[in-house]
Amino acid sequence: MKFGAHEVMDTHEVLAEKMNMMNHLGFYASQAKNPQLQSMIQRHQQEGIRSYNEVVALTRGAGMTGNTRMNPLMPSAGVQGIQQNVQYGINNLQTVTPHPDAVMSDNEIASAMLIAHKNSAKNCTTAALECTDINLRRALTNSSASCINQAYEVFVFMNEQGQYPVPTFEQGTAQTYLNTYQPASDSVMSGLHTQSGAMENRGPFMAGQTNTDSYGSFMNPGGPQPPSGM
């Protein structure tokens, strides 16, 4: 299998991150006291191992051909059903300070998991955007979505425990700010459909791109140009 240099480096970083994440989750499992947190750690570790093995297999070309297409994961892969009951507002915030002790609290474990999942989602997305191999790209995209959902599950747990307060604006401020954006009108949408039909009638070129140089760069970048009589 052939991979581009950029995707090799990014995939290397993703695999190293996944391996360290699994090792850390094993340590967190031995330190956690809350049963809900323990269960979450176990499920997230299992999903991490599955994702790690999948990416490793793809880098070795195991069981994949050029025409193979992987099925996307369910959006909730590795995540237990979540009741969205987020508590908003900041009340009675406790001060914190670094203390590199040998024992971690449940709050510290959950916080570390949340940060790790967020970073993993970003890194998997970045790596997927650089992939030339469609199967590796899809595996990394699936992994990013899984990390996003796992991060949300950790956030909900922390929020329920009062460990992750959500600051808010005054309701009037939030609505005024967001209501700046209004829906696109039906006339705008119908105009887009008209433009789309006109573009399809012209073929695969952008409006105004009718010279043969555009053909070569669009359809076969770096390849030979078509005969001038085409």
Image (tube, rainbow, N blue to C red):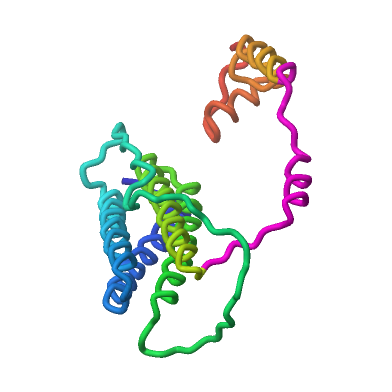
Quadrant position of residue 66: top left
**Magenta part of the protein: which range?**
164-188
Seen in the image, is 172 located left or right of residue 83? Answer: right
The residue under the point 59% across, 82% down is: 95
Front residue of 118/53: it is 118
The residue under the point 32% across, 74% down is: 28
Residue 81 to residue 107: above or below: above
* Residue 114 horizontal/vertical position (percent): 46, 65
**Tally of numbered discs:** 0
Residue 190 to residue 183: above or below: above
Residue at the far top in the pictured view: 201
- Is residue 208 highlighted in magenta? no
Front residue of 223/167: it is 167
* Residue 187 horizontal/vertical position (percent): 74, 16
Quadrant position of residue 192: top right
- Is residue 179 highlighted in magenta? yes
The residue under the point 33% across, 48% down is: 77
